[in-house]
């Protein structure tokens, strides 16, 4: 489905088959000499057909259209190799481009089995197969032609002048695009309406939840009237939605501490007892992918509490355990 949401900006819904997110919002921005396409959808037939159909309907040629990928996840980067032409500039942050550039051979995927072990998922009986991960299954082909961007990099297209904002948390190199004059933010998966971005810790070492909360504060300080997110609905109350997201994570941190009590638990043991906004209530009924992201979210909250000095971490047989100090 194509919807014109602002002058020269069109939202294209790219379907994500058998995925709870349902669709990725790709944004086409019509320029004078060059156009810009922001995010792409999965590298799969359903997403490809929808993108090709939309570009034909909009009368778009990729030879005069550039790509901006907000972050590494395959629902946003999957089609870049399919869409790119020799004339296409592909903008992305360096940390996330490093991951995407390797496709399914990326070193990023080597941490996967270690995460399953460290988090307690293997002990819980989960199947250790990377092929089931949607990010792996629908990753783009190997690509190394990125033009990397960082904080403050400016991209002009038509009447829009976007400044790149580093908003790490959801991924290490997540980037939002901000037009200060038009008070417009293309938020990728940093700020979403109705659903909360998954904040997953795949390995110890970086406080990804702390990074995410700090990035929310950065955006909260800006004058934003319209947010074009990577999924679901357009947001017209950016500050209000940021407050809701921050309150959500504070409630989740409190939930984690209540679960721990005086116990020593793994990330999986905590995730099994957390409050999830799902129709499925029993852990054993959670789909494989949902277990994965739930435990990743639990780990990010546990490690944030460790970084704050509230919890301590011990390790037995390569499994991490968390308990209160």
Image (cartoon, helix red, strand yellow):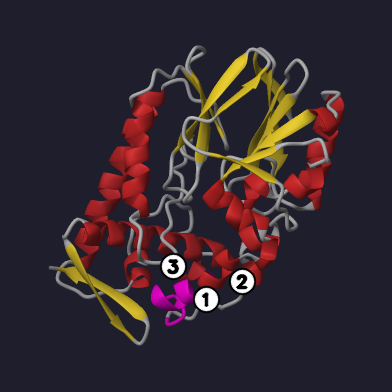
- In space, the residues marked 3 and 2 are separated at their CA atoms by 20 Å
**Residue under label 3:** 283
Circles 1, 2 touching at the beta carbon (< 8 Å): yes
> Which residue is depicted at the point 63% across and 44% down?
76
What is the CA distance from the residue labelled 3 to the residue labelled 1?
21 Å
Instruction: For mark 1, give the secondary structure.
Output: helix
Distance between the Cα atoms at labels 1 and 2?
A: 8 Å
Q: Which residue is mark 1?
A: 113
Q: Which residue is mark 2?
A: 130
Residue 78 x %, y %: 70, 50
Mark found first going from the N terminus, 1 or 2: 1
Give the residues in magenta: 112-123
Please say if the residues under marks 3 and 2 sit with CB atoms less than 8 Å apart.
no
Q: Position of residue 171 (x, y in %)?
A: 48, 50
Circle 2: is it few (<14), some (14-19), or many (20+) Cα within 10 Å? some
* Residue that appears at 68% across and 15% down: 158
Q: Quadrant of residue 230?
A: top right
| Quarter of the image with the C terminus in it | bottom left
Q: Residue at x 77, y 53 (%)?
A: 44
Q: Residue at x 81, y 35 (%)?
A: 87
**Nearest to viewer (mark 3 / mark 1):** 1
- Crowding at dot 1, Cα within 10 Å, few <14 / some 14-19 / many 20+, comes out as some
């Amino acid at each position: 489905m194509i919807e014109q949401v602002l002058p020269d900006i069109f939202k294209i819904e790219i379907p994500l088959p058998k995925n709870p997110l349902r669709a990725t919002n790709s944004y086409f921005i019509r320029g004078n000499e060059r156009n810009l396409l922001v995010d792409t959808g999965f590298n799969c037939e359903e997403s490809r057909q929808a993108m090709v159909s939309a570009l034909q309907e909009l009368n778009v040629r990729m030879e005069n259209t550039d790509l901006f990928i907000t972050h590494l996840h395959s629902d946003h980067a999957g089609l870049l190799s399919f869409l790119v032409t020799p004339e296409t500039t592909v903008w992305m942050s360096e940390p996330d481009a490093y991951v995407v550039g390797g496709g399914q051979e990326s070193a990023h995927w080597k941490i996967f089995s270690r995460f399953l072990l460290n988090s307690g998922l293997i002990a819980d009986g989960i199947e250790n197969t990377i092929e089931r991960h949607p990010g792996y299954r629908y990753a783009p082909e190997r690509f190394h032609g990125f033009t990397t961007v960082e904080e403050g990099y400016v991209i002009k297209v038509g009447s829009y002048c976007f400044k790149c904002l580093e908003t790490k948390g959801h991924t290490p190199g997540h980037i939002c695009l901000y037009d200060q004059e038009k008070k417009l933010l293309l938020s990728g998966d940093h700020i979403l309406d109705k659903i909360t971005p998954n904040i997953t810790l795949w390995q110890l070492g970086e406080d990804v939840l702390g990074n995410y909360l700090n990035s929310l504060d950065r955006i909260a300080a800006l004058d934003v009237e319209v947010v074009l997110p990577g999924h679901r609905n357009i947001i017209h109350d950016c500050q209000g939605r940021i407050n809701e997201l921050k309150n959500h994570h504070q409630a989740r941190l409190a939930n984690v501490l209540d679960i721990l009590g005086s116990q020593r638990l793994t990330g999986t043991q905590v995730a099994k007892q957390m409050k999830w906004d799902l129709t499925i209530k029993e852990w054993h009924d959670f789909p494989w992918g949902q277990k994965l992201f739930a435990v990743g979210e639990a780990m990010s909250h546990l490690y944030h509490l460790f970084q704050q000095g509230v919890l301590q971490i011990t390790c037995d047989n390569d499994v991490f355990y968390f308990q209160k100090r």
